[in-house]
Amino acid sequence: MVCKLADMPENGARGFTLTGADKSDRLDVIIWATRDGDNETISGFVNKCPHMGLPLETFPDRFLSAAGDALICSAHGARFTVDGACFAGPCKGAHLHPLDLRIENELIILPPQKT
């Protein structure tokens, strides 16, 4: 489990650091949640810009544009769509690494990922 769905801001994004059972495996992730009435969708990505491998945010949970319609890399201004495609900035055409998240019983789950 990453978090409860209720812990996500409405139409917002949050960052999480996940660790393995032995605490040596670490994965920084971004979860972007959107709500339209009762329809809730989530997108998840590894928090690493394809341009230089830096985390997208400078300040905790500051991922979205002012309009809330794009993820932004604070280092060099790259902008990403809800599916992780970079449409502006130095890595235009590249993609964030997606994660296969699910919502189960009001929890956001990250099952083991295929490598």
Image: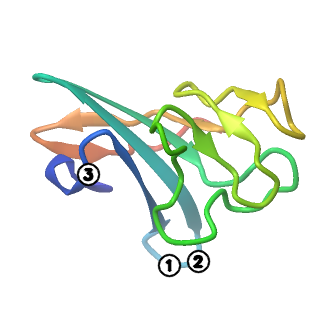
Left of 43 or right of it: where is 88? right
Q: Secondary structure at mark 2?
A: loop
Residue neighbourhood size for the residue with mark 1, other residues' Cα within 10 Å, grouped as few (<14), some (14–19), many (≥20) = few
Q: Which residue is mark 2?
A: 24
Front position in the image: 89 or 29? 89
Residue denoted by label 1: 23
| Label 3 SS | loop
Q: CA distance from mark 1 to mark 3?
A: 24 Å
Answer whether labels 1 and 3 touch (C-beta < 8 Å).
no
Which quadrant is home to the N terminus? bottom left
Residue at left 84%, top 29%? 92
Question: Which residue is tagged 3?
Answer: 8
User: Where residue 62 sits in the image (x, y, percent)?
Assistant: 50, 60
> Which quadrant would residue 55 be assigned to in this image?
bottom right
Q: Please give the count of numbered marks on the rendered protein.
A: 3
Comparing labels 2 and 3, the label whose residue is closer to the camera: 3
- What residue is at 81 percent from the left and 44 percent from the top? 50
